[in-house]
Each structure stands twice: as C-alpha cells, then as structure tokens.
C-alpha cells in the first residue's frame, strides 16, 4: 500500500503573495515559496502548511450560502488565546468579521480573498 502525507491545504486567490502574508501575520509561520503564481507558509517544527495558488477567476464563497450561492469548500480553524484581541488583529490585517456568527465562542471571519476561517478559544 502506498504512503500518503498531507503537506498543505491550498487556497485559490488572485493574489497568492498577499494572502500568504495575511496568514503569515496571523500564524507567525515562515514564508516558503513566494512568487506571483504560488506562495507557501511553513509551520515551525514541520507539519502541514498552507499554500496559495493564483486563480484569476476566483469567486469567494458566500457565508452562509443560500441556494445558488458559491459555497465554501473548506474553512480553517485557528485556535487563539484571546478571542477579542485575535479578531481585532485579524481585522487589522485585512479580514472581515462575517455577519452571521453561529456559535458564541467562535468568530467566523473572511480573509482578504473571501475564504472563511474560524477563530476560537478552546
């Protein structure tokens, strides 16, 4: 049986460098590849990273989606130690807080390309 190893989740965006820098600010990860078509972030200590692929025709998902809306394919869960401060920092970096918040102790935000991500305190 072959061996499989997940190396990254890839997010489509019209601006791979910009989106990589957004998540670099939030996560503190090292920037790997950095060109207009493809950028990567590498977590300290190894493990699964994030990659950002140029997609000129990227259509952001709608959160929450209604029939006919572009739906999210995945979202990122990011654990934080201070939810209020983390949301403020994410917004300062370019995120938007989603209008619909389904859970009291989780904040759904949208990154600069429109991908939903959740900030939460465990």
Image (cartoon, rainbow, N blue to C red):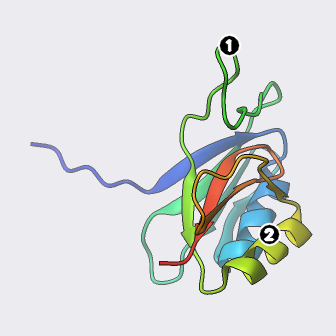
Q: Secondary structure at mark 1?
A: loop
- Which label was assigned to residue 112? none
Q: Position of residue 47 (x, y in %)?
A: 42, 70
Q: Depth check: 59 or 102 in front?
A: 102
Q: Depth check: 31 or 28 in front?
A: 28
Residue name at image x 55 percent, y 34 percent: 73
> In the displayed image of the protein, which residue is found farthest to the top?
68
Classify 18 as above or below 29: above
> In the displayed image of the protein, which residue is found farthest to the left?
1
Give neighbour class at mark 2: few <14, some 14-19, many 20+ (Cα, 10 Å). many
> Tag 2 or tag 1, which sits nearer the N-term?
1
Q: Position of residue 110 (x, y in %)?
A: 76, 51
Residue name at image x 56 percent, y 56 percent: 76
Q: Position of residue 113 (x, y in %)?
A: 80, 45
Q: How many marks?
A: 2
Q: Position of residue 85 (x, y in %)?
A: 77, 83
Classify 8 as above or below 67: below
- Which label was assigned to residue 90? 2
Classify 72 as above or below 25: above
> Hey, which quadrant is residue 57 in on the image?
top right
Alpha carbon separation for disc pair 1 and 2: 29 Å
**In this rendering, would 2 be left or right of 96?**
left
> Hey, which quadrant is residue 118 in on the image?
bottom right
Q: Secondary structure at mark 2?
A: helix
Residue name at image x 57 percent, y 48 percent: 75
* Residue annotated with mark 1: 68
Residue name at image x 80 percent, y 69 percent: 90
**In this rendering, would 31 be left or right of 88?**
left
């Amino acid at each position: 049986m072959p061996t499989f190893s997940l190396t990254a989740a890839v997010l489509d965006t019209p601006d791979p460098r910009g989106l990589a820098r957004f998540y670099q600010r939030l996560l503190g990860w090292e920037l790997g590849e950095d060109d207009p078509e493809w950028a990567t972030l590498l977590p300290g200590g190894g493990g699964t990273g994030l990659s950002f692929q140029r997609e000129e025709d990227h259509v952001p998902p709608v959160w929450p989606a209604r029939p006919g809306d572009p739906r999210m394919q995945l979202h990122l869960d990011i654990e934080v130690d201070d939810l209020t401060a983390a949301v403020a920092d994410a917004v300062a970096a370019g995120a938007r807080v989603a209008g619909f918040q389904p859970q009291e102790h989780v904040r759904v935000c949208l990154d600069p390309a429109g991908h939903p991500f959740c900030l939460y305190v465990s």
